[in-house]
Image (tube, rainbow, N blue to C red):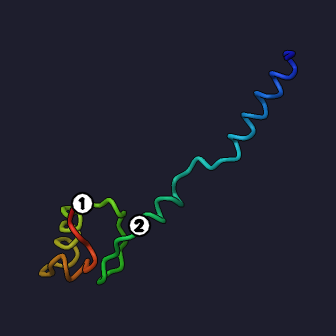
């Protein structure tokens, strides 16, 4: 294998990787599967119960977690 072929293989590998997106914005948007039923704010599926309680306390005083997030199951 000559140096010219090695260089071309390297260029091909670099071009192949350049076409892939570097951003995770679309993946993050798709992972937002928990939604507040009152204000429709979305949360990532990996959110902890404490973060949801913080949301309830700051935005919907007097409500409980089942009022805002009826489908949420604590792990």
Label 2 Cα neighbours within 10 Å, binned few <14 / some 14-19 / many ≥20? some
Where is residue 34 shown, x and y percent of the image?
A: 34, 71
Which image quadrant: the N terminus?
top right
Where is residue 19 shown, x and y percent of the image?
A: 70, 46
The residue located at (36%, 63%) in the rendering is 44
Q: Which mark is residue 32?
A: 2
* Gap between marks 1 and 2 measured at Cα: 13 Å
Compared with 34, 9 (above or below) is above
Which image quadrant: the C terminus?
bottom left
Nearer to us in this view, 66 or 53: 66
**The quadrant where residue 43 appears:** bottom left
Nearer to us in this view, 63 or 17: 17
Compared with 62, 32 (above or below) is above
- Pointer 1 residue: 48
Label 1 Cα neighbours within 10 Å, binned few <14 / some 14-19 / many ≥20? few
Q: Is residue 57 left or right of residue 44?
A: left
Q: Is residue 12 left or right of residue 57?
A: right
Compared with 37, 2 (above or below) is above
Where is residue 11 shown, x and y percent of the image?
A: 78, 31
Q: Is residue 25 left or right of residue 67?
A: right
Mark 1 or 2, nearer chain start: 2
Q: Which mark is residue 39?
A: none
**The quadrant where residue 54 appears:** bottom left
**The quadrant where residue 68 appears:** bottom left
Where is residue 18 shown, x and y percent of the image?
A: 70, 42
Tell me the SS state at disc 1.
Answer: loop
């Amino acid at each position: 294998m000559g140096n010219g072929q090695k260089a071309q293989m390297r260029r091909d590998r670099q071009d192949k990787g350049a076409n892939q997106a570097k951003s995770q914005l679309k993946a993050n948007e798709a992972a937002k599967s928990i939604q507040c039923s009152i204000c429709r704010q979305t949360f990532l599926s990996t959110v902890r119960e404490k973060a949801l309680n913080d949301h309830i306390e700051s935005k919907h005083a007097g409500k409980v977690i089942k009022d805002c997030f009826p489908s949420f199951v604590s792990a």
